[in-house]
Image (spheres, rainbow, N blue to C red):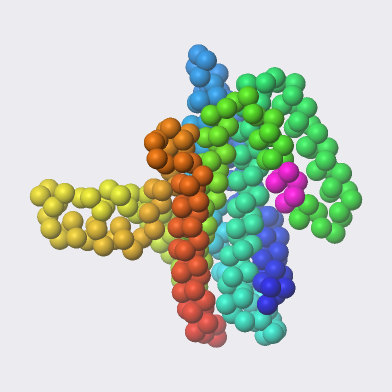
C-alpha cells in the first residue's frame, strides 16, 4: 500500500515540477523578494522588519496559489490525457490514488515554501551579518545543486528535495543574528505549510467530482471564507439580522478557520502571555491534520463511486 502511494506521489511531484504555471509562480515569488528588498531599502533601520512582514505575507499568498493550481489540475490532467485508465486498471485502489496525488502536491508545496523561505533568510543574512556571507552561501548552494544534477542524472527532479530542505536549515542557522525577524519568517513558514495542507485537501475534494475551473473557484471561496471565519462568526445580529448572524455562525463552524495561520506579530514572537509559540504551532498543525484527513476521506469516497466512462 505505502509503496503504491509513494509511486503515485512521486509521479505527481514530477508532473508538478514540470508545470509551467509553477515556474511562473516561482518567478513571481523571486520578484516579490526583490520588491521586498527594494521597499526595505527605503526604510531607516527597519530593513529586516519590513522584509519579514512583506516576505512572509507573499510566501503565504503564493503557496496558496500553488496549492489551488496543483490541486485543481492534477487529477483533471490524468482524465484529459486518459492516463488514469491504465493506472486504475493495475492493482491500485482509488483511495490510494487520491492520497498519492495529495502527498505529491504537499511534497511540491514543501519544496516551494523551503525555497522561498531560504531566499528570505539569505536576504536577512545580508542585512544582519554581511553581504559576502549571503552571496557565498548562495553560490555554494548553486554549486551543490549543479553537482547533484550531474551525479543524479536519472533522478534530477528529486535532487532538489533534500537540497531545498538542507538549504533552508543552513540559511536559518546563518540568519541567527536576525533574532525575532528570523523567528517570524520561520514560524509563519511552518504555519503556511499547515494552511496549504488544508487548501490542497479542499482542492482535491472538489476535483474529485468537479472541473478544474469550478474547483479553483470553490477552493478560493473556501480560503476567503476561512480567513474571515472569526468575522463571520461574530456578525452583529442587530446590524445584519438574526438570519445572517446564524448563517455566519454555522458557516464559521463548518469551514476551517484559516485565520489561525495568519496570527498577529506579537503572538508569533512569543510576546503574548500564556501562549507559547511552539504550543500555538502544534495546535494549528493538529487542526490542519484533522481537516485534511476528513477532506481526504470524503474525497476517497466520492472518487470511489465516480464513473469515468
Q: Work out whether 30 lies above or below 217.
A: above
- Which sits in the foreground, 52 or 305? 52
Name the quarter where the C terminus is drawn.
bottom right
Is residue 103 rendered to the left or right of residue 281?
Answer: right
Q: Please, which residue is most extreme toward the front here?
A: 274
Q: Is residue 296 left or right of residue 107?
A: left
Question: In the image, what residue occupies the spot 63% across and 24% down?
Answer: 177
Where's residue 230, x and y in %? Answer: 30, 49
Residue 134: percent from left, percent from top: 71, 26
Question: In terms of depth relative to the viewer, which is nearer, 14 or 245?
Answer: 245
Bounds of the magenta segment? 160-166
Q: Residue furthest left?
A: 238
Q: Is residue 246 above or below residue 167?
A: below
Q: Most prominent secondary structure in the magenta stretch?
A: helix
Give residue 159's position: percent from left, percent from top: 78, 52
Q: Is residue 77 visible?
A: no
Left or right placement of residue 242 versus residue 163 in this view: left
Quarter of the N terminus within the rendering: bottom right
The picture quadrant where one finds residue 264 is top left
Position of residue 165 measured from the top left corner of the image (x, y, whole percent):
70, 46
Q: Residue at x 46, y 74 (%)?
A: 298
Amino acid at each position: 500500500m505505502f509503496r503504491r502511494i509513494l509511486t503515485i506521489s512521486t509521479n505527481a511531484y514530477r508532473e508538478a515540477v514540470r508545470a509551467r504555471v509553477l515556474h511562473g509562480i516561482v518567478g513571481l515569488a523571486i520578484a516579490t523578494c526583490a520588491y521586498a528588498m527594494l521597499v526595505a531599502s527605503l526604510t531607516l533601520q527597519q530593513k529586516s522588519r519590513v522584509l519579514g512582514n512583506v516576505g512572509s505575507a507573499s510566501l503565504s499568498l503564493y503557496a496558496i496559489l500553488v496549492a489551488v493550481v496543483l490541486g485543481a489540475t492534477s487529477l483533471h490532467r490524468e482524465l484529459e490525457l486518459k492516463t488514469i485508465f491504465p493506472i486504475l486498471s493495475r492493482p491500485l485502489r482509488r483511495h490510494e490514488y487520491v492520497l498519492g496525488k495529495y502527498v505529491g502536491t504537499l511534497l511540491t508545496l514543501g519544496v516551494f515554501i523551503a525555497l522561498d523561505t531560504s531566499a528570505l533568510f539569505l536576504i536577512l543574512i545580508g542585512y544582519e551579518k554581511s553581504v559576502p556571507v549571503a552571496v557565498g552561501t548562495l553560490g555554494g548552494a548553486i554549486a551543490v545543486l549543479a553537482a547533484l544534477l550531474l551525479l543524479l542524472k536519472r533522478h534530477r527532479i528529486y535532487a532538489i528535495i533534500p537540497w531545498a530542505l538542507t538549504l533552508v536549515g543552513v540559511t536559518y542557522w546563518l540568519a541567527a543574528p536576525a533574532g525575532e525577524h528570523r523567528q517570524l519568517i520561520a514560524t509563519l513558514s511552518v504555519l503556511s505549510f499547515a494552511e496549504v495542507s488544508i487548501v490542497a485537501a479542499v482542492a482535491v475534494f472538489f476535483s474529485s467530482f468537479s472541473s478544474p475551473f469550478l474547483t479553483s473557484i470553490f477552493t478560493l471561496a473556501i480560503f476567503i471564507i476561512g480567513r474571515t471565519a472569526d468575522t463571520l462568526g461574530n456578525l452583529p445580529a442587530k446590524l445584519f439580522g438574526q438570519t445572517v448572524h446564524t448563517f455566519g455562525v454555522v458557516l464559521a463552524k463548518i469551514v476551517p478557520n484559516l485565520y489561525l495561520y495568519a496570527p498577529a506579530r506579537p503572538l508569533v514572537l512569543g510576546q503574548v502571555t500564556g501562549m507559547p509559540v511552539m504550543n500555538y504551532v502544534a495546535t494549528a498543525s493538529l487542526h490542519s491534520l484533522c481537516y485534511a484527513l476528513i477532506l481526504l476521506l470524503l474525497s476517497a469516497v466520492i472518487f470511489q463511486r465516480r464513473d469515468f466512462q
